Amino acid sequence: MKATVLESEGLYPQTKKPDPSLRNLALGILLQAFRDIVSPKKASNKEWEVWRQDAIEWFYSTETHPGSLLWVCEILEMDPKELRQWLRDYRCSNRDRRKEMAKKLVRFQIRH
């Protein structure tokens, strides 16, 4: 089985962590995806449903381009399977559990 080669390879030396600004960008993308799922703004605005669906699709995408989940995970040194499991758990939880899970995201941080 051939390993997937991420399109962002070559943007920085593999022996060095990505530039902090690149890590901040990746973290911002991830946090926005979380926000689009757990706290849609202005429920009267129907766009939030589209944003939520886009975020869900983003979490399950197998794309490797910059901005994709796999790219974000590569930059942040995270396991996409764990993030997808979090999403499955969140979507299957009752309202109280979802609130608890969303509160934990407030403290979500990635060390540089």
Image (cartoon, rainbow, N blue to C red):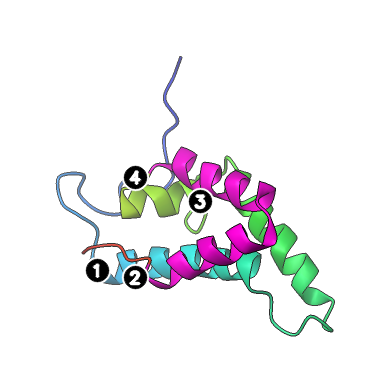
Spatial distance from mark 1 to mark 4, Cα to Cα? 17 Å
Q: Are marks 2 and 4 in contact (CB under 8 Å)?
A: no
**Mark 3, secondary structure of its residue:** helix
SS assignment for the magenta stretch, majority? helix
Mark 4: few/some/many CA within 10 Å (<14, 14-19, 20+): few
Between discs 2 and 4, the one toward the N terminus: 4
Q: Foreground: 106 or 36?
A: 106
Q: Amino acid type of disc 2?
A: Asn
Q: Are marks 3 and 2 in contact (CB under 8 Å)?
A: no
Q: Amino acid type of disc 4?
A: Glu
Determine which residue is flagged by label 4: 9
Give the magenta part as a residue range: 79-107
Q: Quadrant of residue 104?
A: bottom left
Image: 2 above or below 16: above
Q: Are marks 2 and 1 in contact (CB under 8 Å)?
A: yes
Spatial distance from mark 3 to mark 1, Cα to Cα? 18 Å
Q: Position of residue 105 (x, y in %)?
A: 45, 66
Relative to 52, is 74 on the left or the right? left
Image: 81 above or below 57: above
Q: Foreground: 21 or 52?
A: 52
Q: Position of residue 69 (x, y in %)?
A: 50, 51
